[in-house]
Amino acid sequence: MELRQLEYFVAVVEEANFTRAAERLHVAQPGVSAQIKRLERELGQELLDRSGRTVSLTEAGRAVLPHALAALTSVQSARDVVDALTGLVRGSVSVGMVTACASADLTELLSRLHKKHPGLDISLSEDDSHNLLAGVLDGTFDIAVVGVAGDLPEGLESRVITDERLVAGVAANHELAQVSSLPFVELETRSVICLPKGTGIRTCFDAACAAVDVTPTVALEASNLGIIVSLAAQGLGMAVLPESAVGQLHRIDLEPEARSRLELVWRVVGGKNPAASALIDLARVASAE
């Protein structure tokens, strides 16, 4: 008995037709028929009823089918185990990234994965944090970089990439250029320049405003922190951004303190995708470094 015979037998059962099974297997139809006949001769029983318009299982075929499926599953499991042990991870991995993210951590992680498994297909997509979290939970994404303003949904594990204070920045000739701190409520009467909704930093900013019941007056939005700094430097408003991005602007601490946090997230219990498992393992190692 050969694994090929079992594979052909299962394909014919699932397709209920020799021709369609042969097309699925990319082999000639007579070859499929011949291998299944050999299997039947070896077992001493007909496994398939060929008398109708579609192929169906005989009583013996119904008894054999679960064992054939189990054998093929075991063989695939053995291959997966060998792949994992030898590091020959194949397949694809889907990565999500919050809009306007410029994370060196993510690019470094993907670079490590590519160097370790150069045959791996990696896809990268942008979306807002809410959709990315939902996508990780439902399996659309294997791993994602998101802006996190509170606790993660149950079932996710994460590694913090950045955790910075949110501050305001104004031009040197701005009327607040001598001010060192400002309550969030002042943002209701000031022209605010910030990232658009859906970005990680904006998610954290909106959550901080909601926590103190403040509705900021957002005058300008840009998806690039450098442009936000430039707009503020031209006197077009007050930029709200992470403290590391203030640049030449005069920094003003917002009160109460609010944080901008980016996290790399993945499912606690992953699927059977060895490629995704390899990426998650690298993320866990990076967390411990």
Image: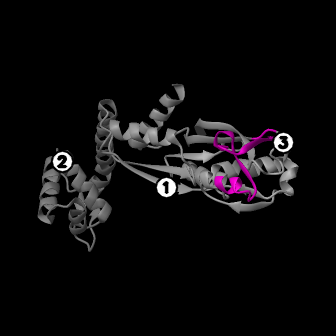
Q: CA distance from mark 2 to mark 3?
A: 88 Å
Labels 2 and 1: the sequence-earlier one? 2
Q: Nearer the viewer, mark 2 or mark 3?
A: 3
Up-down relation of residue 235 to residue 1 (above or below)? below
Q: Position of residue 252 (x, y in %)?
A: 78, 42
Which of the labelled discs sits on residue 43, or is there none? Answer: 2
Indicate whether 254 appears above or below 130. Answer: above
Quickly name the residue at label 1: 125
Relative to 203, 106 lies left or right? left
Query: Which segment is the magenta one?
Result: 230-258
For label 3, the residue is: 179
Identify the mark nearer the N-term, 3 or 1: 1
158 w.r.t. 15: above or below: above
Q: In terms of secondary structure, where does tag 3 sit?
A: loop
Q: Is residue 20 left or right of residue 148?
A: left
Q: Is residue 265 magenta?
A: no
Element type where label 1 sits in the image: strand
